[in-house]
Image (spheres, helix red, strand yellow):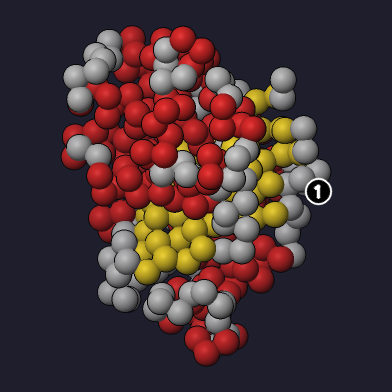
Amino acid sequence: MRRVLQACAAAACCAALAAPLAWADQNDGEEASSQVGCSSAQAGAADLDCDLQIRIAKANAYIAARPGVVSYVLRDRKTGATYHSPHASELIFTASTIKLLVATDLLVRQRAGQLTLTGADQDLMHRMLNYSDNDAANALWDKYNGPGGTTLLRVFQSYGFIDEIAQGSPSASSMYWGNHKATADDLGRLMLYILEQTNPADRAYLLGEMRGVAQNQQWGVWGAGASMAPGDKNGWSEEPTGWVANSVGFAGPDERYMLAIMNNLAGAGGQAEGWATDTQVASILLAGRADDIG
């Protein structure tokens, strides 16, 4: 059984978070504009406006020099344009990002009259989302996912988790939330489902939890910066092949931008490097992004 970390100690979190956030350049977009023209920006980003194309090219250049394999999906919900980075369809252990799927499914099933979440359940959900409490996730998974944990497995695809099943991953039949794999595309579809298909009250709850995460999740998409009002659900764990550090969330006015990042360190780095990379990618892509573009 691989080791899935609980919330880290406050001092360690502060040290790990301070470094990547300190790197974030408030003029990332301006610097990129002076170095890369849209005509030479990243392939596959042509549907995005020039500023985002430039940011994507810079993010990909940064990723190329970092340890591990990083994939991401960025969608501008105002224009509908989407960028899928290389490796966005590669399966990676989800770590705790899958807790967002668990919470979404419980709210959808409650809205449909299939279950009623108690006050204790709601507290567990808050702990699971706020500081990624594994015991809370275990309790909800065991209580509401039927014999052998099969209930949620049957509806994974409804929330956008398509690639795990389509690619025939052995993890697709796992009866434990912590054993699953997904792609950046999968996490992106889940986030878009929440933003665009859930009941408004349930959506408001999930977005509120994601905007109010504890310090141990203030990295990754959080790197978009306070002015972009980001929210995220992150996951990090040491797998048999090395550390993974993943982040999925949103940023911008009316949650304009959806960003899903998956980082498979594959033995080339550890938790700190993963958190730093994800945070810097989000910063390059979204920090200081004006809403009147696109």
Which sits in the foreground, 278 or 78?
78
**Please, is residue 177 above or below residue 98 in the view?**
above
Q: How many marks?
A: 1
- Tell me where residue 10 appears, x and y as whole percent: 59, 29
Please identify the quarter of the rendering in which residue 255 is found: bottom left
Look at 50% across and 27% down and name the residue there.
132
Q: Residue at the location (70% across, 24% down)?
A: 3
The residue under the point 25% across, 39% down is 198
Q: Quadrant of residue 112?
A: top left
The N terminus lies in quadrant? top right
Q: Would residue 127 be seen by someone viewing this image from the given angle?
A: no
Does residue 250 show up? yes
Residue 115 in percent (x, y) is at: 26, 15
Q: Nearer the viewer, residue 148 or 20?
A: 148
| Residue 263 location (% of width, % of height) | 64, 49
Q: At 41% across and 39% down in the image, what residue appears?
A: 157
Q: Residues within 10 Å of mark 1 (few under 14, many from 20)?
A: some
Q: Amino acid at mark 1?
A: Ala
Residue that numbered label 1 is attached to: 268
